[in-house]
Image: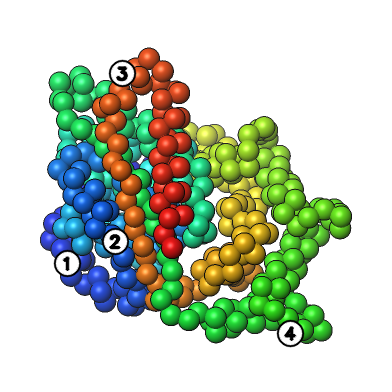
Amino acid sequence: MLDFKPPKPNTTVIQVAKAIMPLINRLCLKGLTLDVDTESIARLKATDGYPTVLAPNHAARADPAIMFLLSKQLSQQYYYMTARETFDKGRFGGLRSFLLQRFGAYSIVRGTADRNAFRTTRELLSEGNSSLVIFAEGEISRQNDTVMRFERGIVQLCFWALDDMKKAEVDKPLYVVPIGIKYHYPQDMWDDIDVALTELEAHILPPTDRTPIERYERLRRIGVAIFKTLAAEYQYKVDETVSLDVHIRKLKGQLLSHAEQIMGIHSEADVLTRVRSLKNLVDAEVYRDVEQMTAYERKIHEELLQKFQRFYPDLERLINFIAITDGYVAEEQSPERFLDVIVRLEREVFGTSKMRGPRVASVRVGEPKDLRECYNTYKTKKRETVEQITLELETSVQTLVTGVS
């Protein structure tokens, strides 16, 4: 596997980062405030000193910073499993990678047998007593109230670590802890929302169609215009008798089938599983170790990368819209839901989105689960046990997110 980034936690670097976090918060995060209740703090302190996997939802780009702020508030030090491409982002990829590793982050190429990442995770859990943050959704949902299905690998790695502990005759708890993160704006955001809608309308709608209408209808009008543009681009036939939600679902399926056809694969799985599989396939090929290839293998590798270029915009579009539905804002017309959808539309239209704030991040922690209690069941029914606990974890996180008013 290409260029594994191991964790190299440095206490001095972490303490300096925590000290200047208020400045970073103002400059880069538009001012984030942490809201953690006393019960959540007590649950996190109860697992301190034991190997623990913290499993938060992943609704926004700020989530890793939230977990870092949480570690600061509790005077704890966390490790972070991080997608490999994160280390190279931006103009200062080298510095970014250096700092992430010193904060305790290590890389994983998703969807592959990344032996270095698996081994590091097992060692951290079986030999250490620290907390490890893993975002089990694998992607950012970009919806404040929605938790996407968890990938089962997070729980499987925990049981493998328990296997290692049993072999070493180590008897101590190994916890998984559900964590719900939900954002809200403490100030009036409607003017910002109106400005964002106006900017989108200027790029999407002809002047004659920009008639004054109610705010939600403006948002929906923009969404329908984008949908119709994409439908024409992908030669999707629009049936006016069918609801927009059905059309959105069908267009996602058509985009996905187009990408799979280029890659020469076919799947009967649900859309989220298929999107994850394609993303993982791309990551696995992009991060292959070119240095170990023969000349012919490099030729095939380059041809595959050229294939990826043909459907990668489709894949990014699917990831952006994967959790969206027509009724998301209609059922609760809050500033948070409006901006969830606006961010997606901005990414589609402009290629990027604006971060708005300040925001309050409410963090709620569920009951820790000691996986030792399930170990005997796991040994007799491995797959079923992993899937059951994964579902329990996902459901607990959704309940925590829903419970934040």
The three-letter code of the residue at mark 3 reads Asn
Residue 120 can be seen, yes or no = no
At 50% from the left edge and 57% from the top edge, which residue is drawn? 145
What number of labels is visible? Answer: 4
At 26% from the left edge and 33% from the top edge, which residue is drawn? 370
SS class, disc 4: loop
What is the number of the mark on residue 212? 4
Q: Nearer the viewer, mark 1 or mark 4?
A: 4
Distance CA(mark 4)–CA(mark 3)? 64 Å
Horizontally, is 279 left or right of 109 in the view? right
Distance CA(mark 4)–CA(mark 2)? 41 Å
Q: Which residue is mark 2?
A: 36
Residue 270 can be seen, yes or no = yes
Horizontally, is 85 left or right of 14 in the view? right
Q: Nearer the viewer, residue 342 or 6?
A: 342
Q: Position of residue 17 (x, y in %)?
A: 21, 66
Distance CA(mark 3)–CA(mark 1)? 44 Å
Question: Eyeballing the image, is 251 above or below 394?
Answer: below
**Dot 1: within a 10 Å radius of its alpha carbon, few (fewer than 14), some, or many (20 or more) residues?**
few
Q: Position of residue 238 (x, y in %)?
A: 84, 56
Q: Position of residue 126 (x, y in %)?
A: 21, 32
Q: Which residue is mark 1?
A: 16
